[in-house]
Image (cartoon, rainbow, N blue to C red):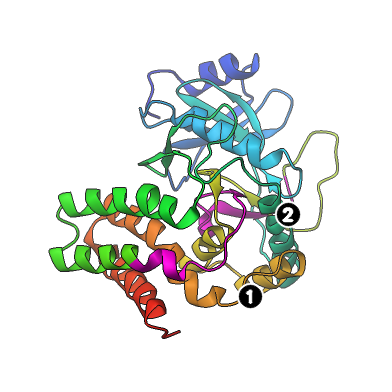
Amino acid sequence: MSSGDDVGSVVLRLTGAAPRSVRQTGATDGPAVRVELADGRLAVLKAAHRQPGQVAAEVAGLRWLAEPDEVGVTAVLGHDADWLLIEYLPAARPDAPAATRFGAALARLHAAGAPAFGAPPPGGPTRAWIGLAPMHNVTGGHWPDWYVEHRVLPYLASARDAGHLTDHDADVIEAACQVLPEVAGPPVAPARLHGDLWSGNVRWSPGPARPGEPSSARTEGWLIDPAAHGGHPETDLAMLALFGCPHLEAVLAGYQQVSPLAPGWPARVGLHQLFPLLVHVVLFGRGYADQAVAAARSTLRLADGIP
């Protein structure tokens, strides 16, 4: 863990009782341990990465996504500036019916809305995070312009400055930004986005085991590790497609049962993936550069009328 505190003292501070047991577990975005709380519940304790506001942003995001009560969201059990304690969700294997239900629930979550594009969750900081990359929640009323200015160009600049993109790569992405308003599809209202909805941030689980309650036998999709903000609903869906969400076709079918997507949406997937791919270039280097350029080229093809 990244703090001098031991796990027991942290859990005691956050919950008022020492844990029964502690065990190391894996985490995609930083150190974490699984703990059994004094009342028998299982939880995961995550350490912040010494980034101001990181825990506050995640807590605000989780609570904002849970507020409409449309989709499962891991519950916050305690937190301070350096530590976050959340419910542990045991893993289960997803199937097509679970994926369909998740897609429908995600559509209802998006429909709960946001005050503006880029709006942070209530109580969440403007300077937030997507994984370990800074993400500024600056609001705007016109999605294509906001997306280019606040979701694409900042990461393009960081990636180029770090030497992860060539000048030619950057030129292609900048050209895509120029035409993006023409090909972004019909206007949409700001949706309540998870914001970092790659497949690893959907936890397939029957839900948390709570003392004295029978656990559900039905697997559902639960949301974890958000970078929540107001945005375009197709962005969350494009991120699900980026790294192979299980039963993606069923997720999309369930989504469209509740909220049909605008015509032409499959051709816009690359446009929406440009943001997360550039974040990956910033965080992980040149290995993602070709994918980012390919997403930009797909946007340019749309402007040329090529699906």
Disc 2 or 1, which lies upstream in sequence? 2
Q: Amino acid at mark 1?
A: Glu
Q: CA distance from mark 2 to mark 1?
A: 18 Å
Whether residue 34 can be seen here: no
Magenta stretch containing residue 197, yes or no?
yes
Q: Are marks 2 and 1 in contact (CB under 8 Å)?
A: no
Q: Look at the image and give the residue range highlighted in magenta.
A: 179-207
Front-most of 290 and 232? 232
Front-most of 267 and 246? 267
Residue linked to disc 2: 108
Q: Which mark is residue 249?
A: 1
Q: Residue 138, image x and y in percent?
A: 44, 38
Q: What is the quadrant of the C terminus in the image?
A: bottom left
Q: Residue 174, image x and y in percent?
A: 26, 62
Whether residue 206 can be seen here: yes
Q: Residue 35, image x and y in percent?
A: 59, 32
Tell me what residue is drawn at x 37 percent, y 42 percent: 132
